[in-house]
Amino acid sequence: MSKQYLTLHTLPDAHPSDVFALAPTNRSILSASGSSTIRIHDTTQADFPLLQSLEGVHPLGIHHLATAREARRAASAGFEGKIKIWSEGEDGTWKADGEISDQLKAGDVWSIALSTDGKYLASSSINGKINVWSLAEEGNPKIRDYETKGSFGMCVDLSRDGRFTASGHENGSIYVFDNDTGRLTHSLAGLVKPVRSVAFSPSTTLLAAAGDSRTIALYDVKSGEQIANLAGHGGWVLSLDWSDTGEYLLSGSHDGKAKIWRIETRQCVATHSHGDKPLWTAKWLPKSTRSEMFALGGGNNAISFYREAAG
Amino acid sequence: MMDATVDADADELLFEPFLPSPPDSYSWDPSEQNLDDKILQGYLEDSQPISITELGEDGESSHGPVTPVPDRDCIIGRIEDMLERIVDGLLAGNEQLTINLKTRSGLSRRHQDAGTIPSARDIEISYPGNNAQDARRFTIVVRILELIHGCLIDDVIITKRDMYYRHPELFGKQPVVDRYVDDIACTLGVPRSLLNVTAAAKGLVAGNFVLSRADGTSMRGLSEPEGILVPTIQAGDVLDMSAVHWILVIEKEATFRSVLSSPLWKVLGTQGLVLTAKGYPDVVSRRFLLHLADDFPQISMHALVDLDPDGIHIMSTYKHGSLRLAHENVAHGNTPGVNLPNLQWIGVKSHHIDRASGNEGDTTTATLADAQGVMKLTARDRKKAHHMLEWGICREYGSEPAWRAELQRMLMLNIKAEMQILDELPGGLVLWLSSRLEVMQGGSSDDEILF
């Protein structure tokens, strides 16, 4: 029941240091690293040419990036503590479109996620606070302020329907908040070690979470019950991403390996090695006319693109 | 000093509770006093002032072109000028007596680039000043000036430790002495050794070397099972390093001791030299290493430090010197003196931690990631890492991209690791070290080879 994915292309020195974040759009992929620059590569052409570099945007390096699925908007988070918002013009050029600066100190904000329409941004923080910001209003005000028990919020995600925010914490806690009511919906048990990635399935029925326990836990978003455990990674799981159809989950590990899991059978159907350096980020590209594709980025400074083998 | 002091007023901080392991000073255990007394005795018996102009053979400096360094008489004269101004002020009945000092305490590394010397800032110390603390500070500086003056006149060496014990109630704590001695050296623009003030030897060294003293005595690096105090090399001393293939600097004494007590040390010890300055290195240890680097450039030098911001800061102090003591580096023209540009980082690095062999489906494989010694970063660690990312050498396009990358990886994973975690590897830390050293001797710089 294994699946074949072929290496399509590798950008060997996409960045001068560890690639920490990838964020795809319909026709390009944004990437960020320990350098101060965001690079944007064209994913519609066979050689993935560089379209644009946003130079010097976070001087101490960039740890997270997010794009909106159905809006031309992106956000970046740098080690200096700022979140910058980016918008893509009609001509395909990305420009700065504001910041989130509401009393943020370095380290206040860690992981970020954008809503499908690009109007909301969720963030986690070192002190465990989870916030939602409105990017549609003047000054990007904070509209939700979720308190947790103070453990480092290592990852955050927004459901595609915009209704839920999920966060994963260093102490193993996973929380799901209802953005409509501003209340905690679930506190999910199951992982005791740091949770480094959380991801809602496209239909918002499932939440995947993983981290140092090396297994991926699947939860039913409605009931909060843990319904499956996907075991197989040998290293800490740093990154999770659902395919557009929700059939497959892509995971990336600190040991440099990426795995693809078929959700229906709960089985690992493919494993790819991106060298032995940490695989910080693994992302599906939005499904286009081409076959299903994903991109990996990590400690070898490279970005590699894979596609499903035909047949 | 710790990052907490970087942007704060150094004078205020000086009188705050003792900060943990600031560079070039250390906490004092009363039980060490006898040891220090012995060292001091050694210095006192030795009428030869320790001056780095005499380090090399034939009285030539071993680093850079020789530019005039103030001699003892000149320094005595300048100290007398400073003291005289105070006496004059007293005689004239001035309401305020003032000493002007230059200091490099509390400088930020933000604007420091490798190889450049930060400029000192001026401070004014007045009596009676605005409060009792000002008055006390003035008294301290005058007393230290007197002590230095006395030692220079008598041409004897004094340790900072001994200075402190002359007036413990006045100085309050050791770092007060350390700081003002350094400020006085900075003000006069000379290395501290030219004031005849040394740090008591704090570092330990062991290995297959022999130091033959001019007086006919000799020190063998393997003579003591627990290492010997780092010696001060003087003119006429001959160092035999012919059996030494590598030099390893170890951040912590505990790790140094466990290396020396390992059965493998019997072999390893015949091939190399290990040194620890027990945390932030003192000038004596750094000068010893500099001497080795200058005279034996073919011997590779490696650093083993904790994977945390302090570990990298300590390695930086070995390699690039201490910011606060930058005047130590400029004894001879503008050639930076006490630093080790070829110091290589052997570990601990983040990829040493999660090295699960990754047998498919086998999640029970023991990994270092689960070992004792892997810890969360504290808020202070994260703050310090952010500060360090702004250092000239750790900035984008700075001279230490690997340090920048590891600081960022620490922040990403929010973990740090002590050297001891390498003991969890099959064969332990020492086997790991010996194979790493072998690999690095072979000229390979590939960190991944062992894994």
Image (cartoon, coloured by chain):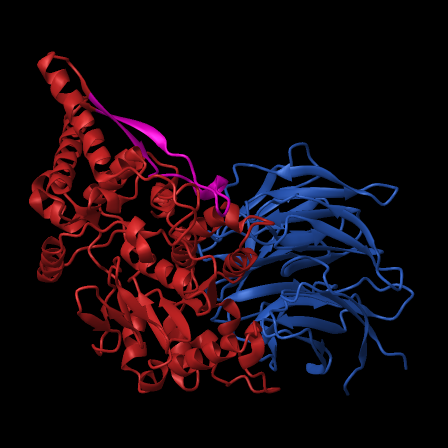
- Which range of residues does the magenta coloring cover? B98-125
Within the magenta stretch, is there residue B119?
Answer: yes
Q: Which chain is rendered blue in the image?
A: A
Q: Which chain is rendered red in the image?
A: B
Task: Return the x and y of residue A112 as percentages of the image width and height.
Answer: 62, 52
Residue placed most toward the observer, A99 or B191: B191
Task: Return the x and y of residue B23 as percentages of the image width and height.
Answer: 31, 51
The answer to whether residue B58 is left or right of residue B95 is right
Residue placed most toward the observer, B426 or B313: B313
Task: Return the x and y of residue B27 as percentages of the image width and height.
Answer: 21, 55
Give the residue at x 55% y 73%: B447
Give the residue at x 29% y 33%: B187
The answer to whether residue B282 is left or right of residue A16 is left
Task: Return the x and y of residue B290 as percentages of the image width and height.
Answer: 37, 58
Give the residue at x 41% y 86%: B427
Within the magenta stretch, is there residue B260?
Answer: no
Residue placed most toward the observer, A73 or B168: B168
Q: Quadrant of the image for the C terminus of chain B?
A: bottom right
Residue placed most toward the observer, B376 or B253: B253
Residue B169, image quadrant: top left
Residue B410 in view, yes or no: yes
B442 relative to B80, above or below: below
Residue B281, image quadrant: bottom left
B107 relative to B256, above or below: above
The answer to whether residue B31 is left or right of residue B9 is left
